Image (spheres, coloured by chain):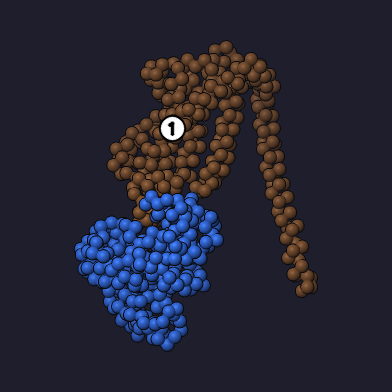
Amino acid sequence: MTSVGTVASKDSTTAPRARRRRSDALSGRLRTVGMYMLSIAIGVGVWQLVAMRYGSALVASPAQTLVAAKDLAADGTLLNSVIASSRRILIGWGLGLVVGVPIGLLMGRLTVIRQLLDPYIEFFRFIPPVAFVTLAVVWLGIGEASKVVLIFYTSVFIVTLNTIAGVLSINESKLRAATSLGASRWQILRFIVLPATVPHIVTGARLAMGNSFLTIVSAEIVAAQVGLGALIWTSRNYGRIDWVFVGIITLGILGFVFDRILRVVASRVLRRYGVKL
Amino acid sequence: MTTEIDRESARGATTTIDGVGIRFGSYHAVDAISLDIEAGEFLCLLGPSGCGKSTLLSALAGFTPATVGAISVDDEPVAGPSPERGMVFQNSDALFDWLTVRQNVAFGPRMRGQSRKAQAALADEYLGLVGLRKFADKFPDQLSGGMRQRVQIARVLANRPRIVLMDEPFGALDAQTRQVMQQEMDRIWRESGCTVVFVTHDIGEAIILADRIAVMTAGPAASIKNIYSVDLPRPRDETSPEAIALHQKLRQDIGHEVRTALREQGLATEEDGR
Ligand SMILES: Nc1ncnc2c1ncn2[C@@H]1O[C@H](COP(=O)(O)OP(=O)(O)O)[C@@H](O)[C@H]1O
Ligand SMILES: [Mg+2]
């Protein structure tokens, strides 16, 4: 290329390069989606083989599961189950956040509170929610409260622990700067500690959401009329393996959708706090 | 209210350091330092790394209590951090990443409950002073290292402190940016009329900026070795004969301290000095 060409080449090559980069990104995304589809197709294939090998008394085939899902959807059972379980998860998880974040902030900031509460956190975080199912029903009855409390229980510790970790990782010079700019202890908590901890809180919220899905089935063991967990438990009594499969798959898809929504909303709304998901 | 910077309120007060010694447990960091800082003065604390410059500055800010002795600003004893004594940190991690540049600078006035209008006016006034008005709505991570330090300076000045404490604020910048920032600092100081205590281990930086340079001895038990008045016209030329002569003298002073420190650690011998 001649020396005259170098000036012109700047403009003439950047546009196609940018276009190429964009099309690279697009084909990258298509590739990812393609791999997902392939992975799911293989999974369904394996499932089909296993179902053929062991028979429908033990494993419902993909087709049987689809038919069962249509039946359950037609009479409204599926939608009602999804709504009932989602409601319990969102309320319990929300309460876990509302309680866990302030406790975590206080424990992170005040050594006295941390020392007073630490033994309980360290004790209860090793006891799974299913261990409390009986007590929850005895104390709170067979209504919604017992289920919501179990979801709350499984959420609150993980949110608290992540919040504490966030508070303890705040750069000391930020806190010093705020103090010497005239912020009171309360103002530092509100205007420095809370915003600086947001990324850790979001991580805690996501983990708590996962825990909530793990817990909802145990929470609905006893005396739940509706809910995905209840569907799974009662189907066993009717010997409907296909319904059990519908319940499990719906639970997985629902969890995936909830996590996706949480990620998208958090990274949009909380972007300025450094949340990147 | 005018956008003119109010020199009187910014100029502030005399600071008295009276026999201040600081210990961390059994480690004797700073020993019996006495020093008066005049209102409107630019004082540089110059000394080898690890001698106790940051420790002394942190005592002035009120973050670290003096083990013995006392510090007072305008006869008011220093008993803890206060907006009267603003601190510019070496690392721009001290900025609040979730706030815009303007919100960072307005932070002090906001904490004091000033009206939104007053906050914005103060922020814009000092952003103008440090040359960042155009970047007011950016976030700190969208700025270069030098610009982030300008934000820190504006944030402290917007509080109209009696004294501004700066701990190697340009130490993490590249050489070119550092040079620009030193010239800018000189201008900002002259325009705002604030009192500055500026910590550095860079001799040239001290010569460009300081009214007086306090050279510290190597730790442990660091004290003030010598105080030099720099009576050169501003903005200063580092290559003027007077500046070069002063540079030489300071280098000898500091070199002596560094050798003493190394010898104490058993890392050097008498011969190294010759
Ligand atoms: N919080 C602390 N605890 C114990 N030792 C400290 C503490 N802060 C500083 N020191 C010690 O005091 C000495 C002086 O430190 P510093 O003031 O940071 O030096 P400089 O800023 O001059 O490089 C160093 O030896 C350092 O290790
Ligand atoms: Mg230091």
> Residue B243: where, in percent of width, then height?
41, 83
A142 in relation to B34, above or below: above
Q: Residue at x 72, y 46 (%)?
A: A27
Residue farthest to the bottom, as pictured: B241
> Residue B63: where, in percent of width, then height?
31, 58
Question: Residue under circle 1?
Answer: A96
* Residue B185 is at least partly visible in this image: no
B219 in relation to A247, above or below: below
> Residue B193: where, in percent of width, then height?
38, 70
Q: Disc 1: which chain?
A: A
**Shade representing chain B:** blue
Q: Residue at x 25, y 68 (%)?
A: B16
A114 in relation to B31, above or below: above
Foreground pick, B65 / B163: B163
**In which quarter of the view is residue B71 placed?**
bottom left
Foreground pick, A205 / B84: B84
**Chain coloured brown: which letter?**
A
Foreground pick, A114 / B15: B15
Q: Residue at x 29, y 37 (%)?
A: A116
Q: Residue at x 26, y 65 (%)?
A: B74
> Hey, what amino acid is under mark 1?
Gly
* Residue A210 is at least partly visible in this image: yes
> Residue A243: where, in percent of width, then height?
61, 18
Residue A272 lies left or right of residue B186; in this view the side is: right
Foreground pick, A247 / A55: A247
